[in-house]
Amino acid sequence: MRSRWPVVALVAWTFFVWTTRIGNIWGDDGLDTAGKVGRTALALSFTFLALAVVGALWRRPSWLRPTVVALAAWTTGVWLVRDTSILFGDHDTSFKIVHTVLAVVSIALSALALRTPAPARTPEPARR
């Protein structure tokens, strides 16, 4: 499991960032219901992908690489779009700094997780 620490770190970070986001969404009185539902769907997409990685780590090692690639690609793509929008949007400086840090950490953990070697394949038993 030591060789999988970047994957575990990405999953833990993803749960931290996106599940806490759900509480923030529903506590935001400035959003209408449609805005809350859309933002929650985005947060749940991350949660779902992180759970898929956990399942691969725990039960399906052959799924680890594809699930990590999916989570890392989604993380990187969403943060590049989201943070660009935040940086050029009408937000205060502290908001921009916090979200840029979230983006940088998320993308860095994604890159590290992608460098994690795929699990070794166990040899098939000989057939008679």
Image (cartoon, rainbow, N blue to C red):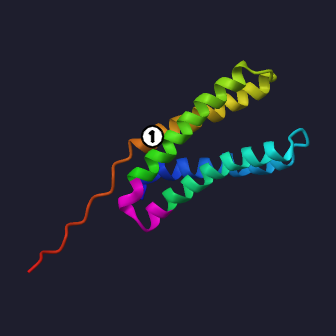
> Residue 23's spot in the image, x, y percent?
79, 51
* Magenta residue span: 55-64
| Front-most of residues 104 and 3 | 104
Q: Is residue 99 above or below residue 90?
A: below
Viewport quadrant of the N terminus: bottom left
The stretch drawn in magenta includes residue 58 = yes
What amino acid is labelled 1 in the image? Leu
Residue 56 visible to the viewer:
yes
Residue at position x 51%, y 53% in the image: 8
Q: Give residue 108's position: percent from left, percent from top.
A: 51, 35
Q: Residue at x 49, y 40 (%)?
A: 73
Q: Is residue 128 left or right of residue 97?
A: left
Q: Secondary structure at mark 1?
A: helix
Name the residue located 60 percent from the left edge and 47 percent from the top edge: 13
Q: Quadrant of residue 102?
A: top right
- Give the crowd class for mark 1: few <14, some 14-19, many >=20 residues within 10 Å: some
Q: Residue 110 location in percent, x, y?
A: 49, 40
| Image-quadrant location for residue 93 | top right
The single residue placed furthest to the right in the displayed view is 29
Write the residue at 51% across / 46% down: 71
Q: Which residue is mark 1?
A: 112
- Residue 69 placement: quadrant: top left
